[in-house]
Image (tube, coloured by chain):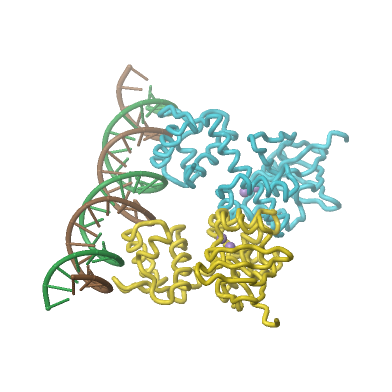
Chain colours: A cyan, B yellow, C green, D brown
DNA sequence: AAATTATTTTAGTTTAGTCTAAAAAAATAA
DNA sequence: TTATTTTTTTAGACTAAACTAAAATAATTT
């Protein structure tokens, strides 16, 4: 039904669309896909012809309902495969993304249905990202970036925004992962850095780190 | 390293090479890959340039050691994935080939190493075909086609030659699978058909069926 | 041995997806 | 409002992998 290239465009546009409220620009897509704007224009025309998105020349692009379905299904596959790799094959959470980038393109609805059951119907992938259901619906959860928390607030790490290997290994080294409870002990106004309490240790956390950790706040003080 | 098309050519040439002793012809490859001879010539040149095979124009083609390694690794992946689909995801043995055709192209040595361990280092796939090791070595077993057996010989089914869905479902219907013990009760000289004993039932088996079942003969009468 | 048939290769197209360079449109600055 | 810069699209070229049609070579038959 869709080529590898088409699938990757749809998936990336989907992500860009949820991050950037308005229409997604050609340059943004080009950057996201590590390609040239002229190539994007070509592919966008192709996908518009297939009714996967709307393209107003010189204005942005936006996925149709059909396009969103296709895209979220690829994301569903990506995240289910990541769960499989971590839960069943004991990969580390920083090792699975590249492999899932390939596996997400395997075409078989039955395979995904069975994989979902085999993994006991997970709601989140190893990085805390939600796994869309067959219809593209996503379980929304209350979460904030650590950088938005104030002094003395507590919470649990529920996800990472960036999931590059360097960042994930940084967290591993400090035994910080999903489910880890934290408390903000101090926050520096000057550079946005923080001191956080993790178990019985204290860590200095730069703003960049704090902006890449999703926290579910524990309301009760 | 290799494109999807290159991998499929190498895999098919490998199979053809083990079935047909001499050099593999252009037309044979074309038929096997459902493509045209002229396309084969082009790809064969490409693979020869990459030292994957030797090509004497107008004479056949034969894989180099390097080419055999690459090909057998794809076959290894294909068969390991088939084991996974049957053993872990409870697919039927006639449902896995198409999906494995896609999965065999996933590029990750680590993935295959872990999958092999996860499956407890299987030696054979669900159709009885041997799984090559990392070096391309295959465990050779004594096996004959059922059609070669004589009256009163006994044996165990250890594999199927053809593994199309129709044939496998035919076997399922009669509860004939790998591990099933059989005895040849009669063999018709005229058309090669047979009567075989399976458990406490007798089945009429055409020559075509008999030519697609691999048997390990039980030497002791 | 010559003619015929079958197989294989070459030559020239096609499509998907990419690129560079140039043109067009939109956004921003003067 | 005009000029400049940025963004986007168009035009034309390239590669991989396929195709058709024609030419070349090998195999087979007369
Ligand atoms: Mn990922
Ligand atoms: Mn993920
Ligand atoms: Mn198979
Ligand atoms: Mn098989």
- Say which residue appears at 59% left-offset and 68% top-offset: B194
- The quadrant of the image that shows the C terminus of chain B is bottom right
The percent coordinates of residue C2 (x first, y second) are 11, 72
The percent coordinates of residue B139 (x first, y second) are 61, 76
Instruction: Tell which of A207 and B10 is nearer to you.
Output: B10
Residue B173 placement, left or right of A13: right
Q: Is residue D22 above or below residue B18?
A: above
The percent coordinates of residue D1 (x first, y second) are 33, 17
Q: Is residue B4 above or below residue A137?
A: below
- Say which residue appears at 83% left-offset and 38% top-offset: A152
- Say which residue appears at 57% left-offset and 62% top-offset: B78
Q: Is residue A15 above or below residue A94?
A: above
Q: Is residue D13 above or below residue A43?
A: below
Farthest residue, direction right: A221
Residue B92 placement, left or right of C9: right
Q: Quadrant of residue D8?
A: top left
Q: Quadrant of ligand 4?
A: bottom right
In this view of the protein, can residue A191 be seen by the observer?
no
- Say which residue appears at 65% left-offset and 69% top-offset: B157
In this view of the protein, can residue A183 be seen by the observer?
yes
Q: Quadrant of residue A139?
A: top right
Instruction: Tell which of C1 and A105 is nearer to you.
Output: C1
Residue B89 placement, left or right of D14: right
Instruction: Tell which of B43 and B34 is nearer to you.
Output: B34
Farthest residue, direction bottom: B220
Instruction: Tell which of A96 and B129 is nearer to you.
Output: B129
The percent coordinates of residue A64 (x first, y second) are 53, 29
């Amino acid at each position: 039904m869709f080529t590898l290239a088409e699938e990757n465009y749809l998936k990336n546009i989907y992500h860009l669309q949820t991050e950037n409220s308005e229409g997604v620009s050609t340059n943004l897509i080009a950057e996201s896909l590590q390609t040239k704007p002229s190539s994007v224009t070509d592919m966008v025309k192709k996908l518009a012809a297939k009714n996967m998105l709307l393209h107003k020349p010189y204005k942005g692009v936006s996925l149709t309902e059909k396009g969103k379905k296709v895209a979220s299904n690829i994301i569903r596959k990506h995240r289910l495969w990541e769960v499989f790799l971590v839960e069943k094959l004991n990969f580390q959470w920083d090792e699975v993304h590249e492999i899932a980038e390939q596996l997400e393109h395997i075409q078989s609805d039955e395979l995904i249905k069975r994989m979902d059951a085999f993994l006991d119907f997970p709601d989140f992938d190893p990085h805390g990202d939600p796994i869309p259901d067959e219809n593209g619906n996503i379980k929304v959860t209350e979460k904030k970036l650590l950088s938005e928390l104030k002094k003395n607030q507590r919470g649990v790490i529920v996800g990472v925004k960036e999931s590059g290997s360097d960042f994930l290994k940084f967290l591993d080294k400090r035994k910080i992962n999903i489910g880890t409870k934290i408390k903000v002990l101090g926050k520096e106004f000057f550079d946005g850095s923080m001191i956080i309490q993790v178990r019985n240790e204290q860590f200095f956390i730069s703003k960049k780190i704090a902006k890449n950790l999703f926290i579910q706040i524990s309301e009760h003080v």
